[in-house]
Amino acid sequence: MISEIQDILGQLDKPFTGEELFDHLPDIVFFIKNTKGQYLVVNNTLVQRCGAQSKSDLLGRLPGEVLRPPLAQSFEDQDRKVLETGQPLVGQLELHFYATRDVGWCLTSKLPLRNRQGEVVGLVGVSQDLRLPDLSTDEYQHVIAAINFAEANLHDPPSVADLATIAEMSSYQLDRRMRRVFGLTTGQWLLKLRIDLAQRRLRTSDESISSIAMQAGYSDQSAFTRQFRRATGMSPRDYRNARRG
């Protein structure tokens, strides 16, 4: 099979990157970067979300040159880690904040690209938008009960085991159903729920960051800041300023 794939790819008029395929998937950002972290290949979705006019506006440039700080810095830090360690980043839950002012949750994965000698020569990555949930079937009635409980108790967030008990199933069974509905594990969904509340309060209120942290179930403001930065690429204060600016 490998030799057959190599034979097909060897007959192509130009190298296959997947760019044209990903141009038809509007809910996925796709890119290939070199060892400097500069864009070599991008799809139309990334162009649009960067507020650019064409792909040429992004090629050869770093995230920091096409995206607003400090979000761009987190992307560059991710790239550097993958390029330096050769370890992939898989299924990172992130809140993306684009130059177009669009904001949305994505699952991001980045894989190192290696040459025949095994050396890292770049990376390839995708960020897929989270899909809208479908809870219309009877199968998910117990899941809805767990979801409602979590949403009503974010100040003291339940554990995955707690939610599984409410849903009358094992943690594994709940995880499987949450993946079907949200594309997330139960733990990822809980994190998203808490960060969603926090970013909404940061954007619409003048409450202190410590107060917002408590509402999202964080008794330690520093722990809240670390988690928020990991999910959004910026501190709560920077996020508030960026959204209002």
Image: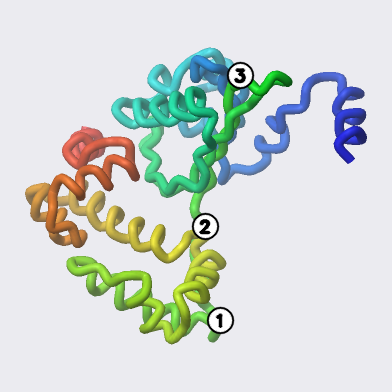
For disc 2, the marked residue is: 131
Badge 2: residue crowd in 10 Å (few <14, some 14–19, many ≥20): few
Which residue is under mark 1?
Answer: 137
Q: Quadrant of the C terminus?
A: top left
**Marks 3 and 2, how far apart at CA:** 32 Å
Vertical order, 86 against 192 (above or below): above
First of labels 2, 1 by sequence position: 2
Out of 4 and 74, give the one closest to the viewer: 4
Q: Callout 2, which amino acid?
A: Arg
> Rounded to the nearest whole Å, what is the CA distance between mark 3 and mark 1?
47 Å
Q: For the N terminus, give its image quadrant.
A: top right
* Dot 1 alpha-carbon crowd within 10 angstroms: few under 14, some 14 to 19, many 20 or more: few
- Disc nearer the start of the sequence (3/2): 3
**Dot label at residue 66:** none
Q: Is residue 211 left or right of residue 172?
A: left
The picture places residue 198, in percent across and down from the top left corner, at: 23, 53
Amino acid identity at mark 3: Val
The residue that label 3 is drawn on is 121
Type of the residue with mark 1:
Thr
Comparing 1 with 105, the one in front is 1
On the rendered structure, is 12 left or right of 243?
A: right
Asked whether disc 3 touches disc 2, contact meaning CB atoms under 8 Å apart, the reply is: no
